[in-house]
Image (cartoon, rainbow, N blue to C red):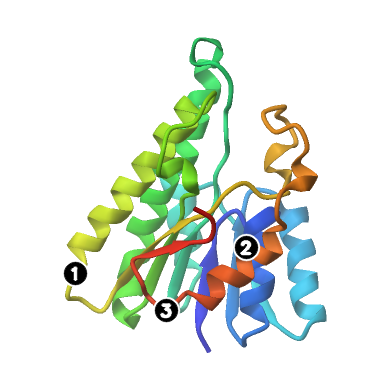
Amino acid sequence: MTYIAITGAGTGLGAALAEEYAKKDNYIYLLGRTEDNLSLVQREIEDAGGKSEVILCDVTEPGSVQKAVDRMEQLDVLINNAGIGVFGPVQELDSADITLMMNTNIKGTIYMTQAALPLIEKNGGRILNIISTAGLRGKVNESAYCASKFAQRGFTESLQKEFENTNVDVTAVYMGGMNTPFWDDSDHVDNPSRLTSPMNVAKYIIEHDDGRAEIHVSK
């Protein structure tokens, strides 16, 4: 059995990944800040015959991250999925929102990776960083968001260099927008329902999760 930790596992792509990986006889650590959401995902997994564990974790806090990882007896795969978006003309962006986004998208990915690496290295595992196409090119009214995603891309590509010729694989995952709660507090996307479902994206990621350097769900 493979042990997989997924951040931001309570909703959207994180929840879809958790449910789909669990169907393949993997043990899923469900990480996030909202226990009710995580418990709902856990119930879905268990109803389908899978196994999972809820671990409360704020990826922006190194202490919270370390406590979460300390609860894991084994870890083979880390999926850094937690992320938030702040959109709009650059001059209108709120500094507090920018800080929270950078702390979540960039620092959260780094903190989780640092804490999980000893277990990942021990088991010859892999890390998947969920980046999005915002890490490939700039977009209108997404300047700060793209900056955070370009940073994730740089971090991921650097990890690939650091762990080249070792037993650790690092994968960058790029996909477009999805119909998830990610857009609930934003008018950046007029009609999120027209976007693809997170379950479709999750299935594609899992199908191509073989340790390759990049997974492009949508170019």
In depth, the one of 112 and 181 nearer the eye is 181
Q: Residue at x 59, y 80 (%)?
A: 27
- The earlier-in-sequence mark between 3 and 2 is 2
- Secondary structure beneath label 3: loop
Residue 198 figure quarter: bottom right
Q: Is residue 194 above or below residue 157?
A: above
- Secondary structure beneath label 2: helix
Residue at label 2?
Answer: 201
Q: Which residue is drawn at 72% across and 54% down?
A: 35
Q: What residue type is labelled 2?
A: Val
Residue 153, horizontal then vertical, whole percent = 35, 48
Label 1 Cα crowd, 10 Å radius (few <14 / some 14-19 / many 20+): few
**Distance from the alpha carbon under mark 1 to that under mark 3:** 15 Å
Residue 58, horizontal then vertical, whole percent = 54, 47
**Distance from the alpha carbon under mark 2 to that under mark 1:** 27 Å
Q: What residue type is labelled 1?
A: Glu
Residue at label 3?
Answer: 210
**Distance from the alpha carbon under mark 3 to that under mark 2:** 16 Å
Q: Which amino acid does label 3 sit on?
A: Asp
Q: Which residue is drawn at 55% across and 50% down?
A: 82
Does the residue at mark 2 contact the one at mark 1 (Cβ under 8 Å)?
no
Q: Is residue 83 above or below residue 145?
A: below
Q: In this view, does 186 lie above or below 158?
A: above
- The earlier-in-sequence mark between 1 and 3 is 1
Residue 25, horizontal then vertical, whole percent = 62, 87
Q: Is residue 39 visible?
A: yes
Q: Which label number is shown at residue 164?
A: 1
